[in-house]
Image (cartoon, rainbow, N blue to C red):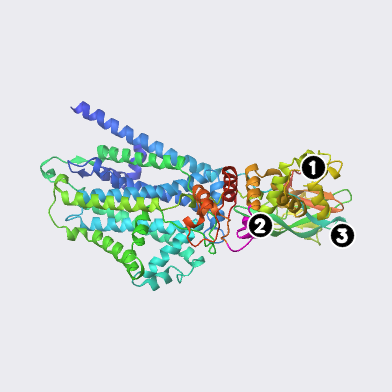
């Protein structure tokens, strides 16, 4: 039955015998595990098309909605987070396998005559893969994407013909908007896939035309068949690649930062890990030399890679005889590794922001209200003013206090005058002020915080008020302007930095006007926890 | 020798097929879930005021324009939309504004004193029942309630028993 159908199809289309012919290819006796990477790269590309198509189903490609739709994919769509993770880690893993494929071809001298064009097309495919990474980076439209791409476009402007390139990218270099976004999106989902698909086909065609690269001595041995032994090896390698990606998808969360904010001056962008070495190289070149690190050096590297078959024209050698090539590849690998490690080491770990985290009411109200909550809890006010309406006093979250400030102050300091209040008060002046602020300026957020804010946060706010941090610093739109705004400190500084900074600010920034604060360890801990809890 | 060769070949083919099946399933199952399992709606189904009962004339349908907030995919938006409201002596009905045949917008035709759909000439009576045409069921009604002389409707549809 099956045979009848296959015969019918083959007679009409020739597909069956075509595939059979493809699988029946003669390959050299030395072919084996070292030549599986091309197939894995192809599979990686197909996986990216697959996950990319699925993401596109729920993605709105405009700056106005891109971030929202991605958040929808990650938080609402069934298996949406998995799809994004697959596309993200698949991209990284594809770059790894494409580079390894190239390293293998380089080490074995597979670029030599008559395979020069196969190699050159391969180098272009590597560049296309990187272009996918660069253009896809912007599409999440979070702060990382926005500021990272800002840097990319500026570097582009240093290149010869940079003005024209920027025009093509839809920007003048000062900001990134709808146009640039649309160009990147168009490149990522139309131009690059089509070009890559075409060149992959051409690349495979060239491999078939010249045959799999033989090792010296293969000409005297009988040839093998591509199917099933080599296909088996390719399949196993593909499975290993897929398993690694699956583990990454399962274990490592792909971050989504806050929606892109061109006014955010506190953001410190970093490129994807595979571009970190370029970022690190660029750090070494300043002023007029910058163009050297940004354009000339990478340009020379790519150029010599592309023209490699014409630089090294020696005859084919066994791998163990290619000491020069092995040394060169080793130096490149060590250099890349060292630069990347350096870049990682100099990246603050606090930077990763979580745009999906829900911002709670107590994270948004000024410290002056929170300190009132601290006082309320400290003095057990809820023994009468229970927050669920069951106390003997009024539930202050439901009814606003209409008492004048001087009455409140008296009530908080000397509750004994009031028959219903507790007989003693443990509150100091600033806590009393905080309570007055709380019961008079109560809004929806304040009431929610009153019920839900964690104890260490309200106590930390109490320390903040007690030390009058707000006379220099602004936090949640309240406070002075002499010191930096403290919102979003978590994205800028690590906990240990914040703690150490209190005791000696000048050690960290010599021009700092901030005096040293000798806080007791408990207060220091509470204050730091509080400061790190306040979002941008 | 030939025997060993044959069993090795068989092993290769088995592994190729097995790995192929595993990868295909690992990609296809999440994809199917992603495409076919709808996320739970974020719509709260809250009631919106659409009309003042005193301004409605009994037996005379009125098309009411009102604003509602709707969660549309990844956006919560406010939009204008309509409903046909009919007041009868004992109750008020708010009809969903599209024909139950193929979803065209119908209107009240004074001449024939019925709802008429322009697409395929479905005709509905005042109570929503099908008078003629291809419509498969009576007009859909929004779940509604009256509070303090105002008509409030939700976007949920009521089951019709007529």
Q: Are marks 1 and 3 on the same chain?
A: no
The residue depicted at 36 percent of the width and 52 percent of the height is A342
* Mark 2 vs 3, N-terminal side: 3
2 vs 3, front mark: 2
The local secondary structure at tag 2 comes to strand
The residue depicted at 63 percent of the width and 49 percent of the height is A463
Q: Quadrant of residue B118?
A: bottom right
Kindly indicate whether the residue at mark 3 contacts the one at mark 1 (C-beta within 8 angstroms): no
Instruction: Please tell me whether residue B53 belongs to the stretch shown in magenta.
Output: no
Q: Residue tagged by mark 2?
A: B77
Q: Residue tagged by mark 3?
A: B55
| Chain to which mark 1 belongs | A
Q: Which residues are magenta?
A: A467-482
The circle drawn on residue A385 is 1
Where in the figure is residue A250, as x and y percent of width and height? Answer: 46, 40
Q: Is residue A8 visible?
A: yes
Q: Are marks 1 and 2 on the same chain?
A: no
Kindly indicate whether the residue at mark 2 contacts the one at mark 1 (C-beta within 8 angstroms): no
- Foreground pick, B97 / A373: A373
The answer for how far apart the CA atoms under marks 1 and 2 are is: 39 Å
The residue depicted at 29 percent of the width and 37 percent of the height is A232
Graded by Cα atoms within 10 Å as few (under 14), some (14 to 19) or many (20 or more), the crowding at tag 3 reads: few
The local secondary structure at tag 3 comes to helix
């Amino acid at each position: 039955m099956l045979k009848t159908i296959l015969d019918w199809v083959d007679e009409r289309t020739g597909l069956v015998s075509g595939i059979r012919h493809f699988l029946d290819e003669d390959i050299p006796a030395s072919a084996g595990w070292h030549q599986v990477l091309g197939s894995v790269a192809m599979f990686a590309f197909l996986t990216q098309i697959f996950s990319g198509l699925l993401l596109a189903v729920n993605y709105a490609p405009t700056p106005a909605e891109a971030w929202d739709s991605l958040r929808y994919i990650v938080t609402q769509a069934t298996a949406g987070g998995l799809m994004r993770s697959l596309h993200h880690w698949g991209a990284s893993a594809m770059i790894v396998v494409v580079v390894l494929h190239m390293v293998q071809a380089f080490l074995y001298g597979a670029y030599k005559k008559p395979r020069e064009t196969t190699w050159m097309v391969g180098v272009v495919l590597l560049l296309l893969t990187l272009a996918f990474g660069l253009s896809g980076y912007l599409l999440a439209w979070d702060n990382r994407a926005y500021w990272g791409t800002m840097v990319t476009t500026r570097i582009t402007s240093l290149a010869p013909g940079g003005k024209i390139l920027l025009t093509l990218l839809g920007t003048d270099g000062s900001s990134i908007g709808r146009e640039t976004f649309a160009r990147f999106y168009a490149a990522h989902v139309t131009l690059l896939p089509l070009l890559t698909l075409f060149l992959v086909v051409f690349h495979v065609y060239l491999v078939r035309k010249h045959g799999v690269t033989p090792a010296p001595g293969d000409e005297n041995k009988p040839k093998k068949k591509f199917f099933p032994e080599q296909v088996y090896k390719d399949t196993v390698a593909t499975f290993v690649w897929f398993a690694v990606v699956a583990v990454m998808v399962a274990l490592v969360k792909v971050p989504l930062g806050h929606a892109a904010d061109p006014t955010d001056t506190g953001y410190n962008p970093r490129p994807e890990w595979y571009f970190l070495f370029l970022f690190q190289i660029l750090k070494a070149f300043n002023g007029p030399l910058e163009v050297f690190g940004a354009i000339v050096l990478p340009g020379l590297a790519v150029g010599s890679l592309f023209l490699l078959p014409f630089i090294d024209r020696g005859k084919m050698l066994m791998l163990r005889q290619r000491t020069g090539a092995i040394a060169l590849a080793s130096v490149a690998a060590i250099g890349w590794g060292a630069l990347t490690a350096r870049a990682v080491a100099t990246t603050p770990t606090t930077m990763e922001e979580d745009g999906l985290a829900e911002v709670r009411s107590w994270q948004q109200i000024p410290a002056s209200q929170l300190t009132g909550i601290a006082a309320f809890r400290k003095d057990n006010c809820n023994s009468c003013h229970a927050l669920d309406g069951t106390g003997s006093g009024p539930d202050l979250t439901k009814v606003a206090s209409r008492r004048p400030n001087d009455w409140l102050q008296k009530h908080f300091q000397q509750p004994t005058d009031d028959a219903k209040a507790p007989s003693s008060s443990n509150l100091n002046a600033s806590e009393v002020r905080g309570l007055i602020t709380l019961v008079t300026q109560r809004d929806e957020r304040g009431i929610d915080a009153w019920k839900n804010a964690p104890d260490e946060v309200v106590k930390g706010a109490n320390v903040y008020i007690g030390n009058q941090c707000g006379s220099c610093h602004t936090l949640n739109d309240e406070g002075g302007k002499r010191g930096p705004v403290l919102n979003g400190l978590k994205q800028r500084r690590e906990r240990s930095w914040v703690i150490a900074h209190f005791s000696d600010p000048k050690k960290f920034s010599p021009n700092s006007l901030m005096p040293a604060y000798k806080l007791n360890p408990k207060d220091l801990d509470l204050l730091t926890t509080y400061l790190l809890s306040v979002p941008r | 020798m030939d025997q060993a060769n044959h069993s090795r070949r068989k092993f290769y083919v088995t592994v190729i097929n097995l790995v192929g099946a595993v990868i295909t399933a690992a990609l296809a199952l999440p994809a199917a879930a992603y495409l076919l399992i709808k996320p739970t709606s974020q719509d709260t189904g809250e009631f919106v005021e659409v009309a003042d009962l005193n301004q409605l004339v009994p037996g005379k349908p009125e098309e009411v324009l009102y604003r509602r907030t709707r969660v549309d995919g990844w956006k919560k938006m406010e939009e204008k939309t309509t409903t046909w409201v009919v007041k009868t002596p004992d109750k008020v009905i708010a009809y969903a504004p599209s024909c139950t045949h193929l979803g065209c917008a119908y209107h009240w035709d004074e001449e024939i004193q019925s709802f008429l759909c322009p697409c395929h000439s479905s005709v509905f009576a005042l109570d929503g029942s099908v008078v003629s045409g291809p419509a498969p069921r009576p007009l859909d009604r929004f779940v509604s309630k009256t509070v303090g002389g105002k008509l409030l409707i939700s976007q949920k549809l009521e089951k019709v028993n007529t």
